[in-house]
Image: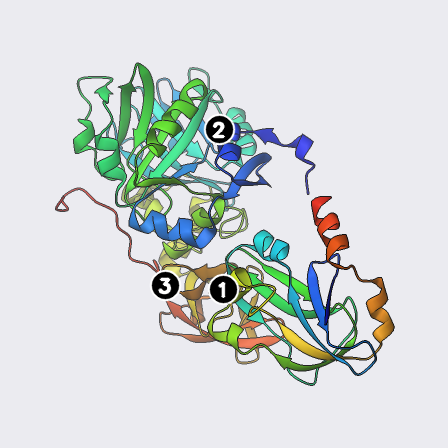
Amino acid sequence: MSRLYTQDHEWIDVAAKGSGAEATVGITDYAQGQLGDVVFVDLPDAGRAVTKGGEAAVVESVKAASDVYAPVSGTVTESNPALADDPSLVNSAPEGDGWFFKLTLSDASELDGLMDKAAYDAFVASL
Amino acid sequence: MADDADLKALPLDALHRRLGARMVPFAGYAMPIQYDGIIAEHLWTREKAGLFDVSHMGQLLVEGDGAAAWLESLAPGDFKALQPHRVRYSLLLADNGGILDDLMVTNTGKGFYLVVNGATKHADIAHMRARLPAGLSLHHMEDHALLALQGPAAVAVMSRFDLIPESADQPAFADLKFMAGARWLWNGVKLGITRSGYTGEDGYEISVPNSHAEALAEALLAHAEVKPIGLGARDSLRLEAGLPLYGHDLDPETTPVEADLSFAISKRRKIEGGFPGADRILDQLFNGAPRKRVGLAVEGRMPAREGATVWAGETQVGVLTSGGFAPSLNVPIAMAYVATAHSADGTALEIEVRGKRIAATVVPMPFKQKNYVREGDKK
């Protein structure tokens, strides 16, 4: 399993490289720190098709609503039911129990443009 | 977004950064949006005391013979009857009755001390100067910062400060009631203190020379009950308290009656008129306004934001002007302007958020009971 990152501060875990593989998506610790206290997450329903860079979810902090984009194209298979009861998991465990949704990839080559952890950490440090 | 280089720094800029604030542009200044987090800061203010830097707001002094009468030509308050050391909430009105700003007016005994919004202060000053008669002076106190200490522990904290009354005819600090104010000397520094605020909590707003603002802030923060609170919690606190925010819930297109602020039109002014837009405003007051500012309890957990539309069936009947999550109530709440026919408490409406309809009910404001200590209340 490898974790990749976008410049919009989403992470994606891919179980295997290949179209049809399942992946898990969330937002990074840096992103949750920028958002502040998360009070609601509007998650996509299973079966919804998402496209790379397109809106996939909305995360609501006390102050504002922010779009979360799909790191790659695919079809949503599940959204995190725990976030309905405890949206603050996004703050306390953004890269763990606070995951957003799972999807099956429609084009595994879209992973090629994403950053690994070292590249993402360098990107955040440059902000 | 304004480039950081275009932003003015508040007198407490260095302190905010030292305290770990996240700074954002607001009203032309770099201002602290949060320190520990909005929810923690909000709840701390409701339980203990929060220190807010509101130095972006405009502090003005109006002095000279006829100052009260002149203010009455701009705003619908009864300033001739406002007693020395008393504070009133008022509205700066355009000729058509629209709200140019909301403000606090204190009778200092020598004139009037006004606090206006930061984003509107330059327009307010231009509006006032253009109408200022000979013999009256209008002074913008740019050399003063403004701090707010808000919360149930505010009184206990301030009681530990050695405050010497500036004059013999003013209330002792311990007897300062809600919506009253005067000046005291603290270590030789003149502080203008009103018992007022914008959180729904008891507390004070303190005007202090820029040169001593940091020393005062540090002295307040030295008390265990006091933490610094950012603009984010200031917004969620005022929303729970049902208090409108200028530029969002109030604007030049909106009258005091529509804004449900008719209490700011003093009884004598309702009878006599003579304030800008009086014909329109008094007509609305007696015959009804087409729309009204209301509170909405939002069903479920998803916040609805400013700009979201409000519906009764297939008819749009209003729009949200503020909306968010209420940390003390743990639910989303909102303020909206709705057609008067749909403004009664208990009216079931819907809000459209990202193409979805969510149920909402018109409810009385404040959403959260205010904790003011008014004159006559038991201490």
Question: Which chain does the numbered disc 1 sit on?
Answer: A
Q: What's the distance in space between the residues labelled 3 and 1, CA to CA? A: 16 Å
Residue A120 located left or right of residue B352: right
Q: What's the distance in space between the residues labelled 2 and 3, CA to CA? A: 32 Å
Name which residue lies at 27% across and 21% down: B184
Residue sticking out furthest to the front: A1
Residue B153 located left or right of residue A102: left
Residue A88: which disc?
1
Question: Which chain does the numbered disc 3 sit on?
Answer: B
Q: Residues within 10 Å of mark 2 (few under 14, many from 20)?
A: many
Local secondary structure at mark 1: loop
Front tag of 2 and 1: 1
Residue sticking out furthest to the bottom: A47
Residue sticking out furthest to the right: A109
Residue wearing tag 3: B329
Question: Which chain does the numbered disc 2 sit on?
Answer: B
Q: Quadrant of residue B85?
A: top left
